[in-house]
Amino acid sequence: MPNTPQAENPKRIVAFLYPNLCLFEFSCVAEVFGLDRPELGRKIYEFVTASLDNQAVTTQFGGVQHPTIRLEDITGNDTLLLPGWDNIHNKVSKTLLAFLVTFNEAGGRIVTICSGAYPVACSGLLDGKALSTHWRYAALFKAQFPAISICADQLYVDCGDIITSAGSAAGLDVCLHVIRKDYGSKIANIVARRLVIPPLREGNQAQFIESPVAKRENNAIAPILDYLYQNLALSSSISELAQRANMSERSFIRKFKSATGLPPKAWLISQRMSVALQLLETTTLSIDAIAQQLGFESTTAFRHHFREKFKTTPTAFREKFQLRSA
């Protein structure tokens, strides 16, 4: 019988348990990869846990978490996910460092959330590469790991076999990124919808560093967002949108950015790019047709924005997705 997508074996995600386990980060991972998703029609991930000594660990606030597999059962076909780390000022076990190197060299993919990047950085696996972690750790990482480029303004950094992400909530972003890499945007969007979060969150850590939390004014902007969602191909001017919202242009721009984190034009381009991913993956439309359907003034402009956002071309992305599907 031919191999069908429904018969594809689920990929295994191994959440690494460590003493004083960060519960929020771990819960994000368990929520994304551990729940059954009947809406997909098949199981796409097997979620398991492991600890360094194969023993239960304490968690934050006095709980206990038991591993479900032994460390030696982890293979190079797995994804090892480190949901945070206990203390980046403590020395990392040589046993763990050796395991990370051996696992990665065997083909294993490593994903980290927040301070979970610390043991991976200590292992030397990221030397000459880049990582993301919580902005409050950026200075310490830069001082301790001069061979690593610390991206304090990125929600996550994908180096292929190692993916690191920023503070706690960015764990959801990187988990969706993993799904998108493994199964494409359509499935990632379905999971995001169930989680009630954006499938591709915009912005970066810079907006959270040493700045007050802005009062969100979504109620005033929500009708405009709905309108733009339904009319992504339209080229509405700021003046037209402000008039539709019954605001001055200045107030409209301020409230729009407060609600979305982006100016109107940048937000619109971002939404078009998200739709472009789905069209490239799920249709045979030409690049020219997609550019026209999304309202870009030219295919050249579409290609420019696509490369700027995804660091690849629409054609290369489609070819990669087709190979992954095959």
Image: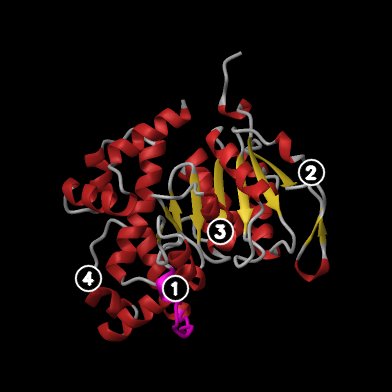
Circle 4 SS class: loop
CA distance for labels 2 and 1: 44 Å
Nearer the camera: disc 2 or disc 1? 2
How far apart are the two marked residues, 2 and 3, measured between alpha carbons?
24 Å
Q: Which residue is mark 4?
A: 237
Instruction: For label 2, count other residues whose C-alpha is less than 10 Å away and answer few (under 14), some (14-19) or many (20+).
Output: some
Q: Tell me the tag on residue 118.
A: 3
Secondary structure beneath dot 1 equals helix
Screen quadrant of the N terminus = top right
Q: Determine if residue 310 is in view.
A: yes
Q: Are marks 2 and 1 in contact (CB under 8 Å)?
A: no
Q: Which residue matches tag 1?
A: 222
In the image shown, does 245 or 198 lie closer to the viewer?
198
How many numbered circles does the render carry? 4
Q: Residues within 10 Å of mark 1 (few under 14, many from 20)?
A: some
Residue type, label 3: Tyr
Marks 3 and 1, how far apart at CA: 40 Å
Mark 3 vs mark 1: give the one in front: 3
Q: Secondary structure at mark 3?
A: helix
- The part of the chain drawn in magenta is 205-217
